[in-house]
Image (cartoon, coloured by chain):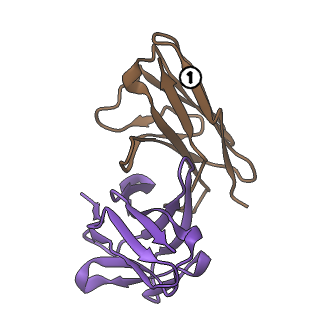
Amino acid sequence: GAVVSQHPSRVICKSGTSVKIECRSLDFQATTMFWYRQFPKKSLMLMATSNEGSKATYEQGVEKDKFLINHASLTLSTLTVTSAHPEDSSFYICSASMPGRAYEQYFGPGTRLTVT
Amino acid sequence: AQSVTQPDIHITVSEGASLELRCNYSYGATPYLFWYVQSPGQGLQLLLKYFSGDTLVQGIKGFEAEFKRSQSSFNLRKPSVHWSDAAEYFCAVGADGNKLVFGAGTILRVKS
């Protein structure tokens, strides 16, 4: 149980284009989803927290207009990297938590984004 | 603010040897503590968690961790390491807003 998927697992896009990453909770309803960014040989940096049906809360220093997050249903959140640049290349990981289960996050397998 | 320190960036142990990965946290109240494992190019898998109660916590894959309030530590242990345990391990503490704050991670190498 508590499986989270991400799609795509890898994506290569050209500079200036936008790319969308999906995060799905497959067997539970996720009231809250989190988006992280992981640089090579670094820890996870929380980008934003999204609650179903409301606007995402972005961490300090994360550009909300560049990283658009939508949490339209209890099983799906999307991260859209707009006007991507090579410095946006990274490993993006989402996680999801269940109602009433504070801090218990279940992580997706991650998406490797490469911007050329 | 909450923070997590994992002092060891890399650790190498022989297969069959015991393992201890260190984690120190900074948090005013009783913390919620976690250990996750990440294989290369993969997401994170929860090994174990501590919320309250018994300070020795058992997890999956034969791992355990001990919460020591006096030392602000939550070290991860395994009595006998297998080659498949080679991965990166992250300690995390629960923060405001149901967030997790992660340490920098410790890369475990297992030599045969």
Chain B's colour is: purple
Q: Is residue B54 rendered to the left or right of residue B8?
A: right
Q: Is residue A71 visible?
A: no
The amino acid on which the numbered mark 1 sits, given as a three-letter code, is: Ile
Q: What percent of the width, then of the height, locates residue B97? A: 41, 52
Q: Is residue A65 above or below residue B13?
A: above
Residue drawn 52% across the image and 73% down it: B48
Which lettered chain is shown in brown?
A
Q: Chain of mark 1?
A: A
In the displayed structure, A82 sits above or below A71; it is above
Q: Is residue A24 left or right of residue B40?
A: right
Residue at (28, 60) in percent of width and height: B2
Question: Looking at the rendering, which quadrant does residue A76 occupy?
Answer: top right
Q: Secondary structure at mark 1?
A: strand
Q: Residue at x 34, y 64 (%)?
A: B10
Q: Nearer the viewer, residue A22 or B75?
A: B75
Residue A36, position as x, y percentages in the image: 45, 42
